[in-house]
Structures are given as C-alpha cells and as structure tokens.
Image (cartoon, grey):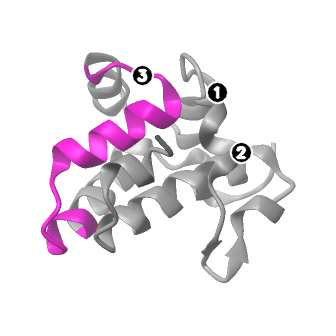
Amino acid sequence: MGNHRIYTMSFASVYPHYVKKAERKGRTKAEVDEIICWLTGYSQEQLQAQIDANTAFEAFLEQAPELNPARSMIKGVVCGIRVEDIEESTMREIRYLDKLIDELAKGKAMEKILRC
C-alpha cells in the first residue's frame, strides 16, 4: 500500500464530487453510477452498499467484483500525469475513474467513455 491519503478516504466522501462535476456539465448521477459500475463490476445495489458503508477508497477498489479488462484502453492525462504511465496499481485505478468522470463532464458520449 502506498501512503496516499486518498486510499484511506471513504469512497462516499469522494463520490458526491464526481456527481457534482458531472451535473455541473449537464450530465446525470445515473451516468456517473454507470461508469463506476462498468469500471468496477459493482451492481447498482452493491455500489450503494459501499457508499453507505463508508468503505475506504482502496478497499472499494480491492473489493470490486471484477475490474473491467477494457480499462487498460483508458489513456490520457489527469492532474498532469498520464494515467497509462502510473505504476502504482491502486493509484492507476483511481485515476482511471477520474479520467472517465472527466470525459463525462466534457460531454463525451457514453459509448466512447465505456470503450464500446
């Protein structure tokens, strides 16, 4: 485990920021949830249970039912760092999610975001 503060933050504390960012750009909470479920393999009910349980971000990713194999197709820059170049696996997974939410907020079509 790295010593990044976000690992111990609850996913529930970060989730509203994802939703707010999307909604500011005319997107929906349902789209945010679809992205998270696509990336992690959680069902909507499992996602809500993780939020309700205040699961730490690192545990949220470790407990993910099935990380989507297509996530390796996610490329680009988040916070000035190319996501595909991040060596630490947990941080890379977090940045994958950040990148997908950024794409949603920028108006990209869901089919492209989900690498369909």
Instruction: Name the residue located 31 percent from the left edge and 62 percent from the top edge.
Output: 17
Q: CA distance from mark 1 to mark 3?
A: 12 Å
Q: CA distance from mark 1 to mark 2?
A: 8 Å
Q: Earlier in the sequence, mark 2 or mark 3?
A: 3
The answer to whether residue 81 is left or right of residue 108 is: right
Residue type at tag 3: Tyr
Instruction: Name the residue located 70 percent from the left edge and 45 percent from the top edge.
Output: 72
Which mark lies nearer to you, 1 or 3? 3
Q: CA distance from mark 2 to mark 3?
A: 17 Å
Residue type at tag 1: Glu
Residue nearer the viewer, 2 or 106: 106
From which residue to which does the magenta span run? 21-44
Mark identifier at residue 90: 2
Mark identifier at residue 62: 1
Instruction: State the residue position of label 3.
Output: 42
Q: Secondary structure at mark 3?
A: loop
Q: Are marks 1 and 3 in contact (CB under 8 Å)?
A: no
Q: Are marks 1 and 2 in contact (CB under 8 Å)?
A: yes
Where the N terminus falls, by quadrant?
A: top right
| Circle 2 Cα neighbour tier, 10 Å, few/some/many (<14 / 14–19 / ≥20) | some
> Is 79 placed above or below 95 here?
below
Instruction: Name the residue located 40 percent from the left edge and 60 percent from the top edge.
Output: 101
Tell which residue pokes out farthest to the bottom in this image.
Answer: 80
Residue nearer the viewer, 112 or 81: 112
Instruction: Name the residue located 44 percent from the left edge and 44 percent from the top edge.
Output: 114
> Is 53 placed above or below 83 here?
above
Which mark lies nearer to you, 2 or 3? 3
The x, y position of residue 63, in whole percent, is 58, 21
